[in-house]
Image (cartoon, rainbow, N blue to C red):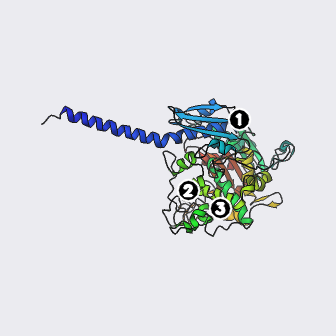
Amino acid sequence: MKKVSVGLLKRTAVLLFLALLLYGVRYAWLSFPIITGYNAKMACSCVFLSGRELENVEAEELGSFPLKMASIKLDTSDHSVTASLFGMARQKAIYRPGLGCTLVNEIPEAEIRRQLIKLATHPDINQDTIPWPQGDLLPDSFPPGVQREKLEKAVQYAFTEKDPGKLWRTRGVIVLYDGKLVAEHYAPGFDRHTPMLSWSMAKSITGTLIGILVGQGKLNVHQPAPVQEWRSVKDGRENISLENLLQQTSGLDFEENYSKSSSATNMLFRRADMGAFTASIPYRDRPGTKFYYTSGNTNVLSRIIRQTVGEQEYHAFPAKVLFHKLGMFSAVMEPDASGTFVGSSYVFANARDWARFGLFYANNGIWGTERILPENWVKEATTPCPVAPQGEYGYQFWLNAGQAGNAVNRKFPDLPSDMYYADGYEGQFVFIIPSKKLVVVRLGQTAGDWFDASGFLSRIISALP
């Protein structure tokens, strides 16, 4: 057997070293700005919007690898957070009152700060003096038939940690039965005034704003989506309808993967105009033929809202037509650097305001005596997309309908099939179950898919008449 020459071993070692070095450089180039962008944006919003201490945010939201590798600098003088990794990939997020935080990407910070943005005027009212649900004044009476002690135990189930390696970190729970607030509880450091991040529950807000514009006659879900980039092309994107975007069947070649550099992470943490970024992506499947959930579809919808409403009214639009009407005065939609709301992911609101949003849908799009959504919108929004395998999606809401012809095949087989819900990363939920007259809000920071939503809701349902 011939001996391997020392020279060959050295050359092999050098080649392996160079390969590892190139891989490391490529990983740093692609991933470091995403890690620092996430850190800067999350720290900025949690500190300046939610009013939390930076140390707590670093320990919880940013405490896992590789996020904890980043260095974070909080600057209260200009309301900003800057993050970097080993002095590289520096990313900055800035806070603006009424708008929350925005990552500085592709557009100079000074230009972003000069943007002329007209927000809706906050009404001068004291919600503590106004009865629920328009206000926060709760009655002394309790609905007959609801087992109060059993309900309290069901709520506490969500706050009881089962596995130290898989923490639930529930931060807020609200239960509405027949429109009445029957249970409410918060983790230490959070209360009914704390605005908390929606993540993808924001998609349900964006879908609702589209519904309002449909009711105003300004949009039609069955027509091609009014996206300028798609009007003059003949590559398939011109056939994408507004309904395709709502149902997540656009067919765009968008990768929704948050564990690496992907369409989703580059859009959220490296792009100034997220809707335009997504609109530029080619399509992979014929529109309407395949269900594939992406945040990109929703940010195209958000951009459509801006173009439909117009620059003068756009930033005040969500508050004027939805939030203020529902008494959701804590709600803030955060924009990207171009000024378009990140409709896929960034809405902050307190737990009671999320409960109001759920109640609004439970009331079929009516608030008080006013119909805000078109008459059939809630029905259409909760009708399963034909190509969703488990009948699990409608118009920017998740459904528990089940597979066509096999309703047992659904995500929550132990829960009612008429349940639908807004669902966000790390366990943000607004559940609406019409057959039980039930709306449940659960907010938290569960780092994996291990919160027992089925067991939690089953316990609540068992306490009801």
Instruction: Categorize mark 2 by other alpha carbons within 10 Å: few (<14), some (14-19), many (20+).
Output: many
* SS under mark 2: helix
Q: Which residue is mark 3?
A: 382
| Residue 217 horizontal side relative to residue 336, left or right | right
* SS under mark 1: loop
**Quadrant into which the N terminus falls:** top left
Q: Which mark is residue 51?
A: 1
| Residue 79 horizontal side relative to residue 369, left or right | left
Q: Nearer the viewer, mark 3 or mark 1?
A: 1
Q: Which residue is mark 2?
A: 278
User: Residue 446 location in percent, x, y?
Assistant: 59, 41
Q: Give the number of marks.
A: 3
Contact between labelled residues 1 and 3, with CB atoms less than 8 Å apart: no
Residue drawn at x 53%, y 48% as measured from the top left? 266
Amino acid type of the residue tagged 1 in the rendering? Gly
The CA span between labels 2 and 3 is 25 Å
Give 54 or 448, whichever is nearer the viewer: 54
Q: Which mark is residue 65?
A: none
Amino acid type of the residue tagged 2 in the rendering? Thr
Q: Earlier in the sequence, mark 2 or mark 1?
A: 1
Q: Nearer the viewer, mark 2 or mark 1?
A: 2
Q: Earlier in the sequence, mark 3 or mark 1?
A: 1
